[in-house]
Image (cartoon, rainbow, N blue to C red):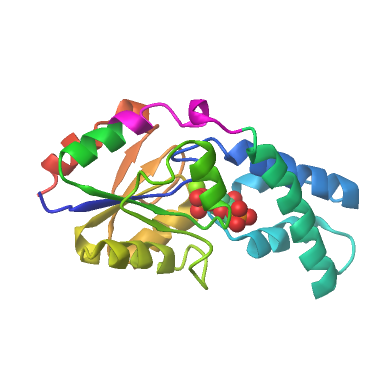
Amino acid sequence: MSIKAVIFDLDGVIVTTDDCHYRAWKAMADDEGIYFDRKINDRLRGVSRMASLDIVLERAEREYSNEEKTALAKKKNDIYVSLIQQLTEADILSGVMENLDALKQGGIKIAIGSSSKNTPIILERIGLSTYFDAVSDGNNITKSKPDPEVFVKAADMLGIPYGECMIVEDADAGIEAGRAAGMTTLAVGNACGADYHSPSLAELSLLDLLCDIR
Ligand code: B16
Ligand code: MG
């Protein structure tokens, strides 16, 4: 098998936190009188908190100072963190645990590669804090997806060459990041530009796919 490790995005691939992000941004935008909908929210997938805020503020009727932006990002995050306290193992997406267990049994390393600074809270809430071989997230990177940094750091933690890693993503920015890292890419859902696509992990045996890739 030429792929030795699979690096998973978190929001939208492992767990259903994407709706919590939407509700938190929507509450913040409504308070400011800024138009925000699910189509705009889709542009925030995989994008860092501050870069996401800049996208939300495209619809604002005035300029915001850096201090105001920091306060708005904190306000959104406070709402988001309160929402994700409700997460449980039941919020792990369908097909995820079956695939993760099979990869582990097949000797494939597994890691998280997420832009989110809230990754440790989310993994703790869903009972997977110690499950992955490596966790690379928004707390150990300086550049967000589509920069490859988060995936490169995950591969370095695992000690696996980039060309022997596959990334699994739900966001265009994440697929771009994986490609920039020289990794094989699998898109779940609507993300574009990947080597492989699947509607979700419930429809796919990742281990079988890796065996097919020579
Ligand atoms: P936070 P992922 C990303 O996570 C989300 O898709 C994106 O919507 C969010 O803005 C970003 O994390 C930062 O999250 O505000 O919690 O640090 O998809 O890369 O797992
Ligand atoms: Mg995602």
Say if the magenta span includes residue 18.
no
In this rendering, the answer to whether 113 lies above or below 188 is: below
Percent coordinates x, y for residue 137 in the rendering: 48, 59
Q: Is 103 left, or right, of 194 in this rendering?
A: left
Q: Residue at x 80, y 74 (%)?
A: 66
Residue 39 is at least partly visible in this image: no
Residue at left offset 71%, top offset 42%: 82
Where residue 113 appears, x then y in whole percent?
41, 55
Between residues 211 and 67, which one lies in front from this camera angle?
A: 67
Q: What percent of the width, then of the height, locates residue 132? A: 34, 48
Residue at image x 67%, y 64%?
Answer: 50
| 94 within the magenta span | yes
In terms of image quadrants, where is residue 42? top right
Residue at 89% in and 52% down: 32
Q: How many marks?
A: 0
The magenta stretch spans which residues?
A: 87-98
In the image, residue 141 above or below residue 42: below
User: Residue 123: image x %, image y %?
Assistant: 49, 44
On the question of residue 75 being in view, the answer is: yes
Q: Indicate the quadrant where residue 19 lies.
A: top right
